[in-house]
């Protein structure tokens, strides 16, 4: 797993850096979980998750304040020499100079935030899980349609960008065109974003690059969205059998997560935007427990059984 620079955490959460002499760009965080040292302040370091970002809150500071100064200095030296990458004090608590000295000696970044400890802990952990998540780049278009994240794939020139543009005109939102960066933030969730260089841009053959945000307003774009389904556009093949009922969902494996996937044949006269909208609403209905194909199947079976009883 690749890491992120601690300086990015400082910038993202506007932390006050108490150890500016240490280069925060050289401190690399590789673990998404956050730890609050507890037993370590009493000298117990077995099974200590030293690779994690360490956060000190109100309970820990109260425990430190209750110690004799000589014991506190011993705790500072022990904690800072344990191999931790950084230490963040919550609730605006400013540590003693002895702790700062021990941190500089052991190349440990020390920062302060005014945020509540539990909220900061949870938010930082969530953010790190996204930043450190496994990532895959896919050629396609990502849009948010009725709250559903739809990844549109298919060969170059099939009409992905044109379909996305029509969806934008119908009030839906663009996340990324051409290249989609997908992160697996959990066993259930994939999050898609655009590379910063192409964010809010769409390429239309024959026209060139257009800025969606500038043309249609900020309500037409999103920076990120969960990926709920995939629509794969392909040229119509007369000899191919396409699913006409949808009783069983086909899935696509992305970073180990199975995402519902629909193969949509493209031919002249088909309105792809309406098809994507309908697929999104139908997918949402399925998540809420209603399956139109299953309902039709049930009705047909009841009709057949009823006809057999009449005989």
Image: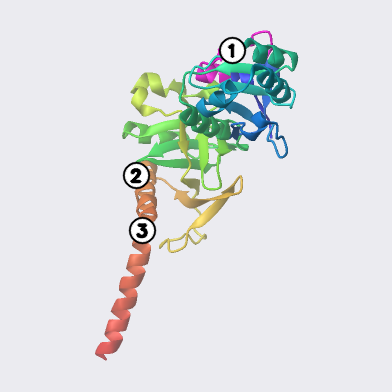
Q: In this view, does 240 lie to the left or right of 108?
A: left
Q: Is residue 309 left or right of residue 235?
A: left
The CA distance from mark 3 to mark 1 is: 50 Å
Residue named by callout 2: 274
Magenta range is: 9-23
The image shows residue 32 at horizontal and vertical percentages of: 61, 34
Residue in front for this viewpoint, 175 or 277: 175
The CA distance from mark 1 to mark 2 is: 52 Å
Quarter of the figure that contains the C terminus: bottom left
> In front of the other: label 1 or label 2?
1
Disc on res. 118: none
Disc on res. 289: 3
> In front of the other: label 3 or label 1?
1
Disc on res. 17: 1
**Quarter of the image holding residue 16?**
top right
Answer few, some or many: residues within 10 Å of disc 3's Cα (few below 14, many 20 plus, some between 14 and 19).
few
């Amino acid at each position: 797993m690749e890491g992120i620079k601690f300086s990015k955490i400082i910038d993202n959460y506007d932390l006050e850096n108490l150890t500016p002499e240490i280069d925060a760009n050289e401190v690399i965080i590789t673990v998404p979980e956050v730890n609050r040292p507890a037993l370590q302040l009493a000298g117990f370091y077995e099974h200590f998750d030293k690779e994690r970002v360490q956060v000190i809150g109100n309970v820990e500071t109260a425990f430190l304040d209750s110690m004799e100064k000589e014991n506190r200095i011993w705790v500072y030296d022990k904690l800072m020499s344990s191999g931790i990458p950084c230490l963040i004090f919550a609730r605006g608590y400013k540590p003693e100079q002895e702790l700062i000295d021990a941190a500089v000696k052991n190349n440990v970044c020390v920062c302060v935030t005014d945020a509540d400890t539990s909220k900061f802990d949870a938010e930082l952990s969530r953010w790190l899980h996204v930043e450190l998540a496994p990532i895959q780049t896919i050629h396609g278009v990502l849009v948010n349609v009725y709250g559903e994240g739809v990844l549109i794939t298919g060969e170059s020139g099939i009409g992905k960008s044109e379909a996305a543009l029509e969806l934008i005109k119908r009030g839906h939102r663009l996340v990324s065109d051409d290249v989609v960066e997908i992160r697996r933030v959990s066993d259930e969730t994939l999050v898609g974003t655009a590379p910063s260089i192409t964010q809010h841009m769409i390429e239309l053959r024959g026209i060139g690059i257009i800025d969606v945000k500038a043309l249609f307003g900020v309500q037409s774009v999103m920076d990120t969205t969960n990926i709920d389904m995939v629509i794969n556009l392909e040229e119509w093949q007369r000899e191919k059998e396409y699913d006409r009922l949808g009783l069983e969902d086909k899935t696509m494996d992305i970073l180990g997560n199975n995402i519902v996937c629909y193969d949509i044949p493209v031919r002249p006269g088909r309105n792809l935007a309406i098809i994507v909208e309908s697929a999104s609403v139908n997918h949402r209905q399925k998540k809420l427990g209603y399956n139109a194909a299953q309902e039709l199947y049930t009705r047909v079976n009841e009709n057949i059984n009823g006809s057999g009883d009449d005989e």
